């Protein structure tokens, strides 16, 4: 139970002001400017203040806190990746998530369920076995389970053999979890602001000033702000913001849609993913099914929902759980996935001195929030890129040193 709940129960009073501290006008300059008030930017602000004592920080958010991709994902946390770089990185995030409700003193509704990636073909079974071996080698709990064990674990999953894509087994990853995504941003933002970080909402960056190869200021709709260092963390808009600094990113931005059903009696413990059926689904502690499928088949900067997505997703969901045919959907939404050619993120330095980047999250941004915040804060504070994120450097694309992670996607691309 988060400490705040316990304190409130015992003291019977309000423990601390949960609201962000609203800053007034922008100052003329800051040591660090963070562009983007989503989970990643706010987590970096929090760790800058907490781990490095750097509090002369402004987070600039063009909308409202956590209103972008932070609230537009399906809130899945896991580390069952394919590459050693990916497994190590997301494993640190999973570990940070496990204690995050305590650390941030807010109920993140963190719920560890296990994560099952279904295999419908012999080739998929081989890939799951490979992923399980890479995971285990790096200390991450994953194993291949075959039909009979899976049927016991998820009794309502349709295990019929006379269907289009029978289920042969799954990669089972016990640490797989879900959490309340916007609360993660609120938690980091609230504590960062109480440590002195200024969070400026409705503050849009309109230009980035660079002198002699070094960032010196950002221009905003509320005036110019000089700065020593900048961290860009604007999922879904990375290419546009980087372009203002003269940086070209190898990123394509593609809509990723999702939806949520009416609440149902709990029947689904693990998160279920089928790459072949293009569907992933989890049941929240409130009983709703949170579901998603493939990215849209075209690049676009729009977060609109389509009927095609819903129809296709429901068709595939019913192949797994036919008894859900009468269930109503409550809500549909979309985020923007910034996809890189190797399906891994971009973190660290850029060709502009003191301009750091956290981008290219594709379909894995939410689950990386704590680790990217912590490690990007370390990078900005020390000027040294931690080993854990070195593999994700921007220059890998010109060095032909890619980190191919497509095989670990839950989402069809
Ligand atoms: O990586 O687990 C995942 C995921 C699910 C939906 C989008 N990404």
Image (cartoon, rainbow, N blue to C red):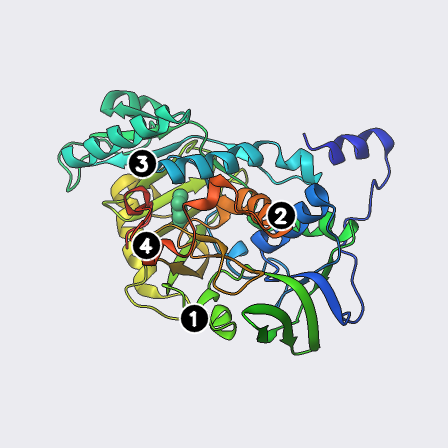
Look at mark 3 in the image and give the residue it sits on.
117
Q: Tell which circle, 4 or 1, labels the residue nearer the N-terminal end.
A: 1
Q: Position of residue 340 (x, y in %)?
A: 35, 57
Q: Is residue 187 visible?
A: no
Crowdedness near tag 3: few (<14), some (14–19) or many (≥20) residues, C-alpha within 10 Å: many
Q: Tell which circle, 3 or 1, labels the residue nearer the N-terminal end.
A: 3
Q: Are marks 2 and 4 in contact (CB under 8 Å)?
A: no
Q: Residue 83 got which mark?
A: none
Q: Position of residue 303 (x, y in %)?
A: 44, 67
Of badges 3 and 4, the one in the foreground is: 4
Residue 249 vertical position relative to residue 401 in the rendered view, above or below: below
Q: In 3D space, how far apart are the residues under numbered discs 3 and 1 (Cα atoms)?
A: 29 Å
128 vs 187, left or right, is left
Quadrant where the N terminus sits is top right
Look at mark 4 in the image and give the residue it sits on.
399
Of badges 1 and 2, the one in the foreground is: 2
Q: Position of residue 356 (x, y in %)?
A: 54, 58
Q: Tell which circle, 2 or 4, labels the residue nearer the N-terminal end.
A: 2
Of badges 4 and 1, the one in the foreground is: 4
Q: In 3D space, how far apart are the residues under numbered discs 4 and 1 (Cα atoms)?
A: 32 Å
Q: Tell which circle, 1 or 2, labels the residue nearer the N-terminal end.
A: 1
Q: In 3D space, how far apart are the residues under numbered discs 3 and 2 (Cα atoms)?
A: 38 Å
At mark 4, the secondary structure is helix
Q: Residue 302 got which mark?
A: 1
Of badges 3 and 2, the one in the foreground is: 2
Look at mark 2 in the image and give the residue it sits on.
382
Q: At x 43% / y 40%, what residue is drawn?
A: 282
Quadrant where the C terminus sits is bottom left
Q: In 3D space, how far apart are the residues under numbered discs 2 and 4 (Cα atoms)?
A: 25 Å
Q: At x 59% / y 62%, what residue is drawn?
A: 36
Asked whether 151 or 145 is in front, the reply is: 145
At mark 1, the secondary structure is loop
């Amino acid at each position: 139970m988060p400490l705040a709940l316990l304190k409130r129960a015992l003291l019977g009073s309000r423990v601390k002001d949960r609201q962000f501290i609203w800053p007034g006008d922008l100052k003329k300059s800051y040591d660090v400017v963070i562009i983007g008030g989503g989970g990643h930017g706010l987590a970096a602000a929090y760790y800058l203040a907490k781990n490095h004592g750097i509090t002369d920080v402004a987070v600039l958010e063009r909308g409202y806190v956590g209103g972008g991709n932070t609230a537009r994902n399906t809130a899945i946390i896991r580390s069952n990746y394919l590459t050693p770089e990916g497994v190590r990185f997301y494993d640190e995030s999973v570990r940070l998530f496990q204690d995050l409700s305590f650390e941030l003193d807010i109920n993140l509704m963190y719920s560890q369920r296990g994560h099952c990636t279904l295999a419908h073909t012999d080739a998929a079974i081989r890939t799951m076995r490979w992923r399980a071996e890479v995971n285990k080698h790096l200390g991450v709990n994953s194993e291949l389970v075959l039909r009979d064990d899976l049927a016991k674990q998820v009794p309502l999953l349709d295990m019929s053999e006379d269907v289009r894509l029978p289920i042969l087994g799954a990669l089972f990853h016990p640490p797989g979890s879900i959490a309340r995504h916007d609360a993660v941003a609120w938690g980091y933002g609230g504590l960062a602001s109480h440590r002195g970080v200024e969070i400026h909402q409705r503050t849009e960056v309109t230009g980035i000033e660079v002198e002699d190869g070094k960032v010196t200021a950002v221009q905003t709709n509320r005036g110019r702000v000089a700065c020593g260092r900048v961290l860009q963390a604007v999922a879904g808009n990375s290419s546009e913001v980087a372009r203002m600094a003269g940086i070209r990113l190898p990123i394509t931005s593609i809509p990723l849609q999702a939806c949520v059903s009416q609440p149902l009696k709990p029947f689904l413990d693990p998160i279920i993913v089928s790459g072949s059926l293009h569907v992933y689904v989890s049941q929240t502690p409130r009983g709703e099914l949170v579901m998603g499928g493939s990215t849209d088949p075209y690049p676009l900067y729009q977060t609109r929902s389509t009927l095609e997505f819903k129809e296709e997703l429901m068709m595939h969901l019913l192949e797994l759980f036919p008894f859900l045919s009468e269930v109503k959907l409550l809500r549909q939404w979309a985020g923007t996935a910034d996809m890189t050619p190797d399906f891994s993120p971009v973190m660290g330095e850029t060709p502009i001195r003191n301009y750091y980047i956290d981008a290219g999250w594709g379909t894995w941004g939410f689950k990386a929030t704590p680790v990217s915040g912590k490690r990007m804060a370390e990078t900005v504070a020390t000027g040294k890129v931690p080993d854990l994120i070195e593999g994700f450097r921007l220059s890998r694309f010109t060095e032909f040193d890619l980190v191919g992670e497509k095989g670990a996607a839950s989402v069809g691309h």
